[in-house]
Image: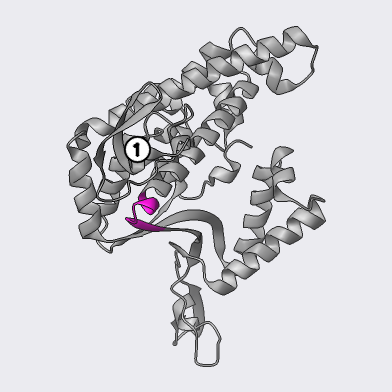
Amino acid sequence: MIDWERYFKYDKDGYKFIIKEIHNEILYKKDGRKQGNNILPFIDEMELLLIDLLLKSENKELTISNSKLLILLCLINPNYMTYVKNKEHLSKLINMDINFIIDFYDVTNSTFRSAINTVTKRLENKRLVIHEQVTMVCFVDTPVQKTITGHNKIHDMFDYNNDLDTYTYKDIKPKEVRREATKDERELIVRVEKHIMKNKYGYDNIQDLFMDGKATSFYSDVSRILFKELNIKKAYKAHRYTFNIDNLEEERIKLLDKYQIDQLQKQINNKVMIRLDETNNKRYITALNELLETETNKVRTNVRADINYIDNINFLSSSLIDKDNVDSIKSNMDDKTLDDIDLDMIHY
């Protein structure tokens, strides 16, 4: 049927259509697909919180890592990133089979990736931001300067005693600088990744390598070479948002009629845990049905069908997601930086 509501208001009387009012302008056609059941329940609050975060930037631009973005949008608490690459340690710490932990990160990673993509697309569609994914590096710098001929200045490295004609090493402390990778660095990073993926691991596709659970060792190998050759301790992806302050502030004021900033953080955090609980229950039922219909040796299916699955996943959600429950896990691990985790490899 023709979408008449875009053109005029009408009533239907039997087989007759009675025109009540003709619109001065044709109304925009709404895409009903966007209102499906799969829409995340915390996206509205997350949108406002992201706008508020952007407005706190002084440069009309914000570059932020996945890790920091997830925390500042209250999708997780810091424990989540602490253990993302230390799942075995977490398994021993809380006395839980590591397969439950791997599955938990698998589910949450998918949810968080979708959430960031959705809320970013919303702001792009409203023409409030320009979004880019950029490659960042943790570059290790030293205070050693170069001579005009390109050699390290000995004066920066040693103290020289003219009377004794001796050299003493200076205490030179390296400095970590986080910045966007240069064009040459990006070219070398992708070359190193390709070389290791192909020649050491024997893969032609990075997703195949990830699916075989080798992401952590792969990135360790990449980082080792980058540090040796380029003084780059770590390369990682980040989001860059460029925006107009006036337009963004206007949208923030409009959305504040519905929400207050001081309420958003807990609302989002609670809704994330509710969504994950619903997803995990569905996966539990699906796994049980799969086992009833056919015998399977799939690790993932057996983990999700385990009688302790729901309780274990709920415990992980409380410990790694709940922003008010950060101290629930006690560990002797050093604090980890939050800038170097990519969503691409969280669940591997």
Instruction: Give x and y (percent) for residue 345.
Output: 60, 43
Q: Nearer the viewer, residue 345 or 38?
A: 38
Q: Nearer the viewer, residue 322 or 242?
A: 242
Q: Which residues are magenta?
A: 123-130
Relative vertical location of residue 228 with respect to residue 288 in this rendering, above or below: below
Instruction: Give x and y (percent) for residue 193.
Output: 69, 58
Secondary structure of the residue carrying numbered label 1: helix
Q: Residue at 45% x, 28% y: name it.
A: 320
Amino acid bearing label 1: Glu
Would you say 6 lies left or right of 169 here? Answer: left
Q: Residue at 34% x, 56% y: name it.
A: 127
Q: Quadrant of the C terminus?
A: top right
According to the picture, the residue beneath numbered tag 1 turns out to be 5
Label 1 packing within 10 angstroms: few (<14), some (14-19), many (20+): few
Q: Residue at 34% x, 52% y: name it.
A: 126
Q: Residue at 40% x, 34% y: name it.
A: 75
Task: Say how the picture is coloured.
Answer: one colour
Would you say 315 lies left or right of 151 here? Answer: left
Q: Nearer the viewer, residue 62 or 91?
A: 62
Relative vertical location of residue 137 with respect to residue 33 in this rendering, above or below: below
